[in-house]
Amino acid sequence: MQRILNSPTRPHVKVIIPAFNEEQSIAHVVNDIPEDWVQEVIVVNNASNDNTVAVAEAAGATVLTEQKPGYGNACLKGINYLTDINRRPEILVFIDGDYSDYPEQLPELIRPIIEEDVDLVIGSRALGNREGGSMTFPQVFGNWLATSLMKLFYKVKFTDLGPFRAIKFDKLIELQMEDRTYGWTVEMQVKAARHKFKTAEVPVNYKRRIGVSKVSGTVKGTFLAGYKILYTIFKYL
């Protein structure tokens, strides 16, 4: 059953959740999204080999499947689904499926778009409260390095590359997103800076995820993510 926006005065909001083997956490994420704010929750099953699909459907999400592994591939699959004229939202929110974010903070995340006409809002874990152990040292350092380089080269101030973010859908289409793996979040921020979009950050809280991270939980994932993030920052100079 799809979620229907109750108030006609609120914007048309949809949520994309990329998910790879998140059967333990995905229902928590979907259920904690404020349903009076969101019309549809889209879980993109990214080549999972567990029960992510069944659990997400039971929680009320629309489930799509993208067999090509990669965070960006999953996000692009969801965006392609929403380009249909009958499905297009005004605001699109991205959140991870591991339950490390607090979905109930969604109204705070989109408030700058509604009240200040901001184009892109990043939920900053650096500005919010982080549970001990929720981010590894390479994650914290990598975020600091990436945002410092963006400030230096693109003259834009961010404190995080957080996955919990909101953007006007028309502006997202204008960015012509391409990255299919680890560079997705930084590509969006770099391209937004190049397009002179109005951006903002809001503090979001962060806790230890359910299960093991597919990126920071392995040496290979950490290295590849770091390389791709730096590559993307310099690619668009």
Image (cartoon, rainbow, N blue to C red):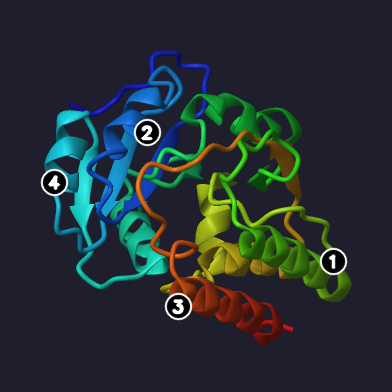
Whichever of labels 1 and 3 marks the residue nearer the N terminus, that label is 1
Whichever of labels 3 and 2 marks the residue nearer the N terminus, that label is 2
Q: Position of residue 108 (x, y in %)?
A: 63, 27
Determine whether 169 is above or below 192 in the image.
Answer: above
Q: Which element is circle 4 on? A: loop
The quadrant in which residue 221 appears is: bottom left
In depth, the one of 98 and 43 nearer the eye is 98
Image quarter (top left, top right, bottom left or bottom right) of the C terminus: bottom right
In depth, the one of 26 and 10 nearer the eye is 26
Is residue 192 in sight in this rendering? no
Judging by the rendered image, the residue that carries numbered circle 1 is: 151
Q: CA distance from mark 1 to mark 3?
A: 27 Å
Q: Nearer the viewer, mark 4 or mark 3?
A: 3
Q: Which element is circle 1 on? A: helix
Q: Residue at x 68, y 77 (%)?
A: 233
Is residue 103 in sight in this rendering? yes
Whichever of labels 4 and 2 marks the residue nearer the N terminus, that label is 2
Judging by the rendered image, the residue that carries numbered circle 3 is: 220
Q: Nearer the viewer, mark 1 or mark 4?
A: 4
Whichever of labels 2 and 1 marks the residue nearer the N terminus, that label is 2
Q: CA distance from mark 2 to mark 1?
A: 32 Å
Whichever of labels 4 and 3 marks the residue nearer the N terminus, that label is 4
Residue contact at pointers 3 and 2, CB within 8 angstroms: no
Residue contact at pointers 1 and 4, CB within 8 angstroms: no
Q: Residue at x 62, y 61 (%)?
A: 139
